[in-house]
Image (spheres, rainbow, N blue to C red):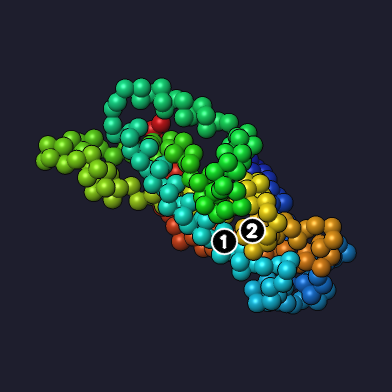
């Protein structure tokens, strides 16, 4: 009994230490965003003088360097369109691989999984030159296409969830004359709310958090076209950091708010989607 109690205490203590290590940088970012000093303050953890001036500057006093409202709008528009397209792709591919039977189904599934094992950044140069040839660089449409094009490869978790939907329901619908689209839309989708929510959140987070592709594709130097990640990164340049670092911290806090709200509202369905999709592969 004592040994078991000791193990529980040790386990919880280790988790507490890891949580503190993980939370300290986030806490420092938040408290620094309320500092009245514009640069980096390394002498104290908490600001000597507190102020909300950084949030006011970001939201209401845009200048040639900090154009946060534009960046936020750009990122939000890209994320919303990417979310809609990617969610449709993922759910359709997952349904086809789970509920339909066709030639080369398993080889195609295996190929998709293997391709998905490679990081997308490996194709970065090829993607850039293709977009440049099509005139889609320095264009938000190009970013949306890049984020959405390969989203169907991430079908595996959604497929695992669809595998749990009773086949008898689909068979009964076939007997009643329902088409494949009717079954997908009217039977499978209403029963798959958790995986839909999981897919929506995952699809939204990709463009919201991405920096690499956004930086490469939106490379004209026109700051009004940038996404939030590019704009905030630009504030860390050597010539700007002493005047914009606390605004950078404030921007980091503001960017985290929408995705945090979305996650907390849909947390129940998000967890159900992950666990449900892990039942079958």
- Residue 277 spot, x, y in % from top left: 41, 39
Residue shown at the point (49%, 39%) measured from the top left: 150
Residue at the spot x=38%, y=33% of the render? 280
Nearer the observer, 172 or 184 = 184
Q: Is residue 27 visible?
A: no
Q: Quadrant of the C terminus?
A: top left
Question: Is residue 35 toward the left or the right of residue 185 in the image?
Answer: right
Residue 151 seen in the current view: yes
Residue at 69 percent across and 76 percent down: it is 61
Does dot 1 land on a helix, a strand or a loop? Answer: helix
Find disc 2 in the rendering and name its residue: 226
Q: In the rendered view, does 41 fall on the left or right side of 176?
A: right
Q: Nearer the viewer, residue 142 or 92?
A: 142
Q: Quick one: which residue is furthest to the left in this view?
A: 176
Which of these two is toward me, 111 or 141? 141
Q: Residue 74: which disc?
A: 1
Closer to the camera, 108 or 187? 108
Q: Position of residue 84 (x, y in %)?
A: 42, 52
């Amino acid at each position: 009994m004592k040994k078991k109690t000791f193990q529980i205490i040790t386990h919880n203590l280790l988790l507490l230490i890891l949580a503190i290590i993980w939370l300290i940088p986030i806490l420092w970012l938040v408290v620094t965003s309320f500092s009245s000093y514009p640069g980096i303050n390394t002498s104290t953890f908490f600001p000597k003088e507190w102020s909300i001036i950084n949030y006011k500057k970001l939201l209401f006093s845009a200048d040639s360097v900090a154009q946060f409202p534009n960046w936020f709008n750009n990122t939000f528009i890209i994320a919303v369109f990417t979310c809609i397209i990617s969610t449709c792709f993922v759910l359709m591919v997952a349904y086809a691989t789970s509920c339909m039977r066709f030639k080369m189904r398993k080889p195609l599934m295996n190929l998709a999984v293997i391709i998905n094992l490679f990081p997308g950044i490996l194709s970065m140069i090829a993607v850039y030159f293709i977009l440049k040839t099509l005139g889609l660089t320095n264009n938000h449409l190009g970013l949306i296409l890049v984020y959405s094009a390969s989203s169907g490869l991430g079908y595996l978790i959604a497929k695992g969830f669809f595998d749990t939907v009773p086949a008898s329901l689909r068979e009964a619908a076939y007997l009643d004359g329902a088409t494949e689209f009717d079954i997908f839309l009217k039977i499978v989708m209403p029963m798959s709310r958790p995986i839909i929510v999981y897919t929506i959140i995952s699809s939204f987070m990709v463009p919201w958090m991405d920096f690499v592709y956004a930086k490469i594709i939106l490379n004209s130097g026109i700051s009004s076209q940038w996404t939030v990640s590019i704009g905030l990164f630009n504030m860390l340049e050597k010539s700007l950091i002493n005047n914009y670092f606390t605004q950078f911290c404030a921007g980091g806090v503001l960017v985290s708010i929408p995705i945090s709200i979305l996650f907390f509202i849909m947390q129940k369905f998000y967890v159900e989607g992950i666990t449900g999709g892990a039942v079958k592969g």
